[in-house]
Amino acid sequence: MIKSKIYYTLNLVDSEWKKELNDSEVIFTSPTFVISNIYKSMEGPKSDQYVVIDDSNEELLYLTAFKTNAISSDEARNLSNDFVCHTNFEYRDAEHYNRWNMTDRINSQYPRITSISNGVENFKLPEGFGFPVFSNERLFINAQALNHNITDSSFHIKHKIEIGYTKHSQKPLIPLQPKTVFMMFPFDPNNPDKGPTEQLPNACIPVETKNHTYIDTKGNPLSGHWIIKPGKHNYAYDASSQLHIKDSIRLHQITSHLHPFANRFVLKDKTTNQIIYDCKSENFENKIGLKRTPSFSSEKGVWMYEDHTYEMLLEVNNTTDKDQEMMASMAIFYYDDAMEKKINELKF
């Protein structure tokens, strides 16, 4: 981060975001990222930006597709997506929900739309569905670079970020509401490098104790970014409280955010023993990185209920002889009946 700030302040590399707009897609190009070291997840150069799709008018749009590619700094060539750590897409919940007079939703959850990450660089929502925003509404993009493998050179890259959308005036879609659920495990704040003990048998060793530390209802610290030792490991996490289902929801999309060495990521209804999402990710064999992380997508949808227990299960295999870092989250989308009523009330 310090190096990036120096590069941008001294105008040594391009520090500006760019935008291209057409009738069904907006493309944002990040500033230049200088790759000069090994950068694991959350360590590489990054850039944040508030963006607007089209501030020349106020038109209802549905976001339907998300994609990120690494490109050369001259923007002429596609590069390996090994250099994409993540792209986070977020809305400003106060601005977003005030426009709809749905102020009870403000601060009710983290306002993330979704995330693109290594192994899943693009996805589309099911046909006929989208996340509604206004064309002149401010959104937030966070882009960060990654480099697990190259140690013998320094080079420049950018991220090309594409958001597909459909105009309400052309085709009204069914609105979806996003939510992110993620694994968290306890750790000893007085000795965070110790790991599991008799008192904390489910404890993890956190990567760091600041940015990804959370507090449970009893005041105990939890980490969402932890260390995995060499070998195979299995993790289980009760996601029911994070899902916070009221009555029922109809789930239509899941996209995972995982780190290298993750092999399988499952969302399971423990009440019925039904596996809702079985993500079998594929790692590269000759280098560190995720080759493919499948998403779940369904036009019909899957019903989930308030009185059911939902569990996330993670299988990893650290095939190196070194400690590695792990995160595991699911960006979900489910039918938003309250938003659909608001849209039907609008006068276009």
Image (cartoon, helix red, strand yellow):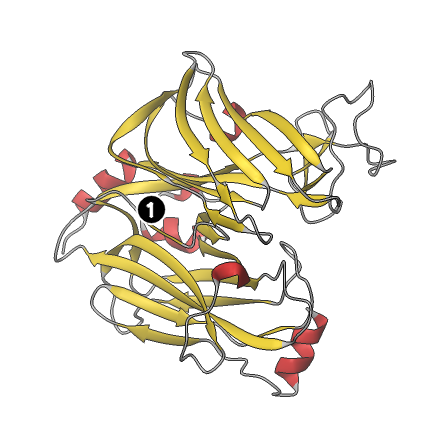
In the displayed structure, does residue 164 sit left or right of residue 8? left
Q: Mark 1 points at which residue?
A: 101
Task: Give the answer, above or below, for where 113 lies relative to 15.
Answer: above
Residue drawn 18% across the image and 49% down it: 346
| Amino acid identity at mark 1 | Asn
Task: Give the answer, above or below, for where 136 lies relative to 295.
Answer: below
Q: Nearer the viewer, residue 270 or 96?
A: 270
Q: Which of 123 and 15 is in front in this view?
A: 123
Residue drawn 63% across the image and 55% down it: 42
Q: Quadrant location of residue 188?
A: top right
Residue drawn 41% across the image and 76% down it: 77
The location of residue 181, given as percent across then percent down, is 51, 36
Element type at mark 1: loop
In the displayed structure, does residue 309 sit left or right of residue 327? left
Outermost residue toward the front in this view? 286
Q: Quadrant location of residue 76?
A: bottom left
